[in-house]
DNA sequence: GCTGCTTTGTGAACGTGTGCACGAGTGCCT
DNA sequence: AGGCACTCGTGCACACGTTCACAAAGCAGC
């Protein structure tokens, strides 16, 4: 119990996979499975079995040799490690196309991230209701963050407004940001930022497609730099 | 010219950063900047200058020592490497909340990924028009993929329908998939899949928030496994 | 209790990614 | 022409992540 503070740091790569395991385990639990092997979990998660075992070993030795892992207990442990023992309300900045879709996406609240509010800078959008959440003015952000104890903000604005949105979120007291705008946000070191950029993902796919196609054909007619 | 086929493989980590450099360079170019140093590019991209230089060196030696990189030329080279010399039409499967937002998100077409079509399995949604694109029935997928020469598919369905959507995309001839559903897709080895999972991103943020909060307090009242 | 089968947990080897540090090349100024 | 300031390109060392392989541990059947 005293060593609880000295909890080993979990590698980033592992933290990124825990949510996947958690989802699979929850599904399996719902289907009545109460014990699962690392091999099966790996198969369902599309990864290597050794990786699963190593990942889970960072949480502690919660498996039983010769048997596998008790699904319900593992779910509990992963949830605890990820801090999912309670809800984390989020506030969405930007009530455009994306903000609306996010607010309407039920999966948010279901998975422990209820939408505490959605704000926009455009007065015309304020007051409209999206999936039960009323759009409020961005000036109300500090109040929402404080009364609802929000620590996670979602930036769903156009690129040009993203930095301002982030600044406001930080000033309001948010400490983690999920950024959907195609911009590199400048924030204080202590703020955790994660980025989701659709264009980047598509361009990575494009790279592989182009490579698959041979790639060489595009070399025809290459312009040269100014110098000789 | 003969060595064009022997193009060095670019590391995944670098491929993932090239789109970021590309966006920044394009912006800088629009602002009239025509030469940029690795240091400045690194600053704007939120990365290390040495990393920028190493990344760009995989494309070839396109910089000038003592000066920096010619913005326009670098943009051209990155676009070429990423296969962005021509458009890549995409087809979206699922006309729900997310599918609609994606279709309406202008950034898609602008960046070289025009929406060639959006399909849904629900007859009730077929025929409606989203941002100029008419929703068609999923049975028309093969036809859309072939006539529009689509090689990238976007899965924007609920989790339960995602695998079926992926299967249909693959059968229709798509070779790259961008998956928004919280499911690990099973596809032939040759198909490139990238995943965007909002819940995973939020859970990673949750982990850091929980860790920030101390983490130990949640240990109170931990249930134990069945065994002694 | 012993044997055999299964599956975990982890040391060790390998591969990938990062960042420093510095040689090498370039432009500018005198 | 020579010196100086600047910046790229890259070898090298280190950190991080992945995978293998196997001992340790548990269960089942007899």
Image (cartoon, coloured by chain):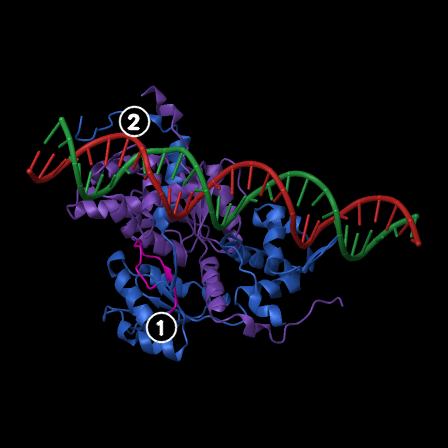
Chain colours: A purple, B blue, C green, D red
Magenta residues, start to end: B174-188
| Residue A221 falls left or right of residue B93 | right
Where's the N terminus of chain B, which quadrant?
bottom right
Q: Quadrant of the C terminus of chain B?
A: top left
* Residue at 49%, 55% in the rendered image: B12
Q: Residues within 10 Å of mark 2 (few under 14, many from 20)?
A: few
User: Which residue: 48% across, 58% down?
Assistant: A200
Q: Nearer the viewer, residue B144 or D30?
A: D30
Task: Residue at 29%, 74% (x, y): give it.
Answer: B127
- Separation of disc 1 and disc 2 at Cα? 51 Å
Q: Is residue B37 left or right of residue A155?
A: right
User: Could you tell me residue A159's position as x and y percent?
Assistant: 51, 55
For label 2, the SS is: helix
Find numbered disc 1 in the image and state the secondary structure of the residue it sits on.
Answer: loop
Which disc, if any, is residue B173?
1
Residue farthest along the top direction in this orientation: A2
Residue B227 lies, in percent from the top left, at 17, 29
Which of discs 1 and 2 lies nearer the camera? The answer is 1
Residue that label 2 marks: B219
């Amino acid at each position: 119990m005293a060593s609880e503070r000295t909890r080993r740091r979990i590698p980033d790569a592992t933290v990124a996979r825990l949510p996947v395991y958690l989802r699979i385990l929850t599904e399996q639990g719902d289907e009545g499975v109460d014990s699962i092997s690392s091999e099966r979990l790996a198969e369902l998660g599309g990864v290597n079995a050794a990786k699963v075992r190593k990942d889970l070993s960072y949480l502690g030795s919660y498996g039983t040799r010769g048997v596998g892992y008790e699904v319900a207990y593992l779910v509990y442990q992963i949830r605890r490690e990820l801090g999912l023992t309670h809800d984390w309300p989020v506030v969405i900045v930007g009530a455009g196309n994306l903000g609306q879709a996010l607010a309407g996406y039920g999966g948010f609240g279901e998975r422990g991230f209820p939408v505490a509010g959605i704000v926009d800078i455009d007065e015309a959008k304020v007051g409209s209701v999206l999936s039960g959440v009323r759009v409020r003015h961005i000036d109300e952000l500090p109040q929402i963050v404080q009364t609802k104890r929000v620590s996670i903000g979602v930036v769903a604005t156009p690129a040009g407004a993203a930095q301002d949105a982030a600044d406001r979120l930080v000033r309001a007291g948010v400490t983690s940001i999920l950024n959907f705008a195609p911009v590199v946000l400048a924030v204080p070191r202590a703020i955790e930022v994660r980025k989701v950029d659709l264009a980047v993902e598509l361009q990575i796919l494009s790279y592989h497609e182009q490579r698959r196609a041979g790639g060489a054909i595009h070399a025809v007619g290459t312009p040269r730099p100014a110098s000789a």
